[in-house]
Image (spheres, rainbow, N blue to C red):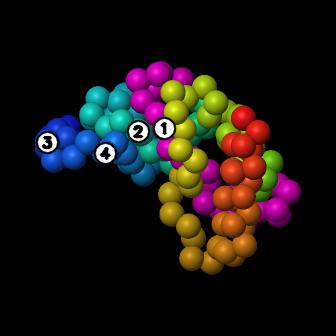
Amino acid sequence: MQTIIRELRTVTDVPIIYFANNGATLIPHTTTCGADVLGLDWRIPINEAIARIGDSHSVQGNLDPLALFLPPDALRKRIRELLVMAGEARGHIFNLGHGVVPQTDPDQVRLTVDTVHEYSQKQ
């Protein structure tokens, strides 16, 4: 990954996000890959990942995709909790900890986006 990212840097100046699914055990290694942002899956609490990463990188993630099957109030609560825990990060891009499950109700995705926007505007 270091080689790939180093080569990418020669052709672009856009921030690079690196995501390793099921990568919680790889955090010490991913912090040296050269990416600007480390994507996190849902298998590690985001505050624990941030503590391991320190302030060297921003993070992206890490809502469990199956949380989109929760009742709306429970989903909103889960999102707010994640955003609060991510507050210690150098920077945080809200995202799922992996892809959207095909059976996900699009209204739940819309609710997720709206909840993140509402919370972020208050901060």
Are dots 2 and 3 in contact, CB under 8 Å?
no
Tell me, yes or no, whether the highlighted magenta stretch contains residue 51: yes
| Residue wearing tag 3 | 10
Q: Which residue appears farthest toward the right when viewing the image? A: 73
Work out how far the residue at label 2 is from the one at label 4, CA to CA, in angstroms: 11 Å
Q: Which one is earlier in the sequence, the residue at label 1 or at label 4?
A: 4
Spatial CA distance of label 1 from label 3 is: 23 Å
**Does residue 2 appear to the left or right of 82 in the view shown?**
left
x then y, percent, for residue 50: 53, 29
The disc labelled 3 sits on which kind of residue?
Thr
User: Residue 59: which numbered mark, if any?
Assistant: 1
**Given contact means CB atoms under 8 Å apart, are the residues at marks 1 and 2 in contact?**
yes
Please name the amino acid that badge 1 sits on. Answer: Val
Tell me the element at label 2.
Answer: strand
Q: Is residue 49 left or right of residue 72?
A: left
Specify the quadrant that holds the N terminus. Answer: top left
